[in-house]
Amino acid sequence: MRVEMDKLIAGAARMGIELTAEQVSSFEVYYGELEEWNRRVNLTAIVDREGVQVKHFLDSLTVAPLIGDHVLHLIDIGSGAGFPGVPLKIACPGIDLMLVESVNKKAAFLRHLVARLNLEGVEVAAGRAETLAHDERCRERFDIAVCRAVAGLATLAELSLPFCCVGGRFIAMKKGDIDNEVASSERAVELLGRKLVEVKPVELDEFEGERRSLVLVDKLEPTPDKYPRRPGVPRKRPL
């Protein structure tokens, strides 16, 4: 294993994820591509090696224990530079993955990255979640929808739950104190066909006391056809 990814290796091990030498090598390549592309495309403000390992790679892998070795259809909404979807694919290669990104330059990076890492079973969809969720290829197709984007939980639920099949799960990755946010999202979660199951704290030494949580919402019923609303509305007028 390479010492250059020591923070990632150690943190993943504490989560019960033993990365192989090949997986560590994939993360090394990922970091190199991210660093190179970030010089001309604004992918992330975090570019130092330790910061990427902890705040991007390890943060993404906090979802992995909820996936395990199952073959699942997973969608990453607002993937940006590939977080959390690509690290999850590296750690859990059996998943079938769709990366949704509305910014064309970022989508181009994702396509390049998928090819560079030789990842199979990955599709990059360039478009808005509000539009793609009404496409029959995507609607209620996925076992897990995960979102790391910065938005309120009610907004994220409207953008994500329409992609989940009945019996599937939406996972929102959140930071800070989210008690009020969770409470204010109850109406949206109810409307969209689901049940808030758990707010799962994420505790890892590498996060240095910064509060992180995974909000788990199970999809119990089909989402009404009118959701999500047209592009921009879920963020401007949360349910």
Image: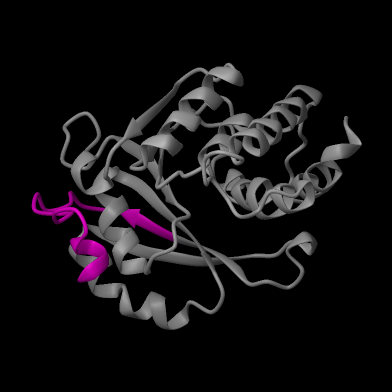
Name the one closer to the observer, 128 or 8.
128
Residue 33 in percent (x, y) is at 64, 31
Residue 135 in percent (x, y) is at 17, 35
- Is residue 81 visible to the viewer in this orientation of the structure? yes
Please state, as top left, top right, bottom left or bottom right, where the C terminus lies in the image: bottom left
Principal secondary structure, stretch drawn in magenta: loop
- Is residue 96 visible to the viewer in this orientation of the structure? no
**Farthest bottom residue in view:** 180
Residue 75 in percent (x, y) is at 39, 39
Quadrant of the rendered structure where residue 20 is? top right
Please state, as top left, top right, bottom left or bottom right, where the N terminus lies in the image: top right
In the rendered view, would you say 176 is above or below 55? below
Residue 235 among magenta residues: yes
Q: What stretch is highlighted in magenta?
A: 216-239
In the rendered view, would you say 32 is above or below 117? below
Q: Which residue is drawn at 17% across and 52% down?
A: 223
Q: Residue at x 9, y 53 (%)?
A: 226
**Farthest front residue in view:** 40
Residue 66 in percent (x, y) is at 55, 47
Residue 28 among magenta residues: no
- In the drawing, does residue 7 fall left or right of residue 39? right
Q: Residue at x 20, y 71 (%)?
A: 237
In the rendered view, would you say 37 is above or below 11? above
Colouring style: one colour
Q: Residue at x 27, y 65 (%)?
A: 235
**Farthest right residue in view:** 3
Number of callouts in the render? Answer: 0
- In the drawing, does residue 217 fall left or right of residue 211? left
Quadrant of the rendered structure where residue 24 is? top right
In the rendered view, would you say 53 is above or below 27? below
